[in-house]
Image (cartoon, rainbow, N blue to C red):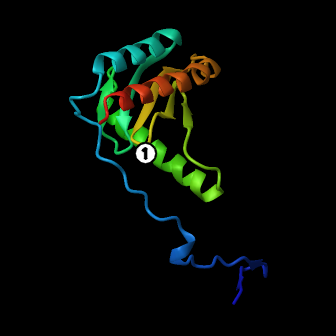
Amino acid sequence: MSVVDSTGTVLPRRTARQPGDLPAPRSFPPSLAGNPALPYAAIGQELADLRLQIPGVHGCVLGGVDGLLITHNMQTDVDPNDLAALAATTYGLGRQVGLRLGQGEFQQSTVRNDRGYLSVYAVSPQALLAVVGQDSINVARLHLHAPSTAERLAALLERDRP
């Protein structure tokens, strides 16, 4: 059955998806938040180095895909717990876009606002790097340096795993 609007135009009808049309839900490993075995000093140094390499970066957060804060080096009054949750939300949206469009796994997403940026980068299946910057930040430079920082953070997170 077709749907016709008030002008007589036939509108496309959306069909219901079958359960097999969607990918299986992904199970996540335990959260990294509060893990005493993590090399926090080395992780903190990576976050500080990224902040210092890119003028205009207000701070960085390493958070879990579950939205929980692992560690941060925020230099503003932004709550790092809120930022970790926002990073996970951004990741969730980006992940769904990748799945629906068949474009693969989430890599990064950037949100530009009136007075600044939030960029979220995949670190590992469990962790995300969120970077907050002012509007004058050189986003191209950030996108050049942040992925290598994310790779080093991933190596640090894997280093002490059994």
Q: Quadrant of the C terminus?
A: top left
Residue at the image position 43 percent from the left and 45 percent from the top: 89
Whether 94 is drawn above or below 101: the answer is above
Horizontal and vertical percent position of residue 14: 64, 76
Q: Residue furthest bottom?
A: 1
Q: Residue at x 46, y 49 (%)?
A: 92
Name the kind of residue labelled 1 in the image.
Thr
Residue at image point 39% right, 43% down = 65
Of 93 and 64, nearer the camera is: 64
Q: Position of residue 139 (x, y in %)?
A: 61, 22
Residue 101: quarter of image: bottom right
Q: Is residue 5 left or right of residue 150?
A: right
**Quick one: label 1, few (<14), some, or many (20+) residues within 10 Å?**
some
Residue 75 shows in the view: no
Picture coordinates of residue 134 (x, y %)?
A: 51, 19
Residue on which the image places disc 1: 89
Residue 84 visible in the shown view: yes
Q: In the rendered picture of this protein, how many numbered marks are placed on residues?
A: 1
Q: Quadrant of the N terminus?
A: bottom right
Q: Secondary structure at mark 1?
A: helix
Displayed quadrant of residue 78:
top left
Quadrant of the image occupied by residue 61: top left
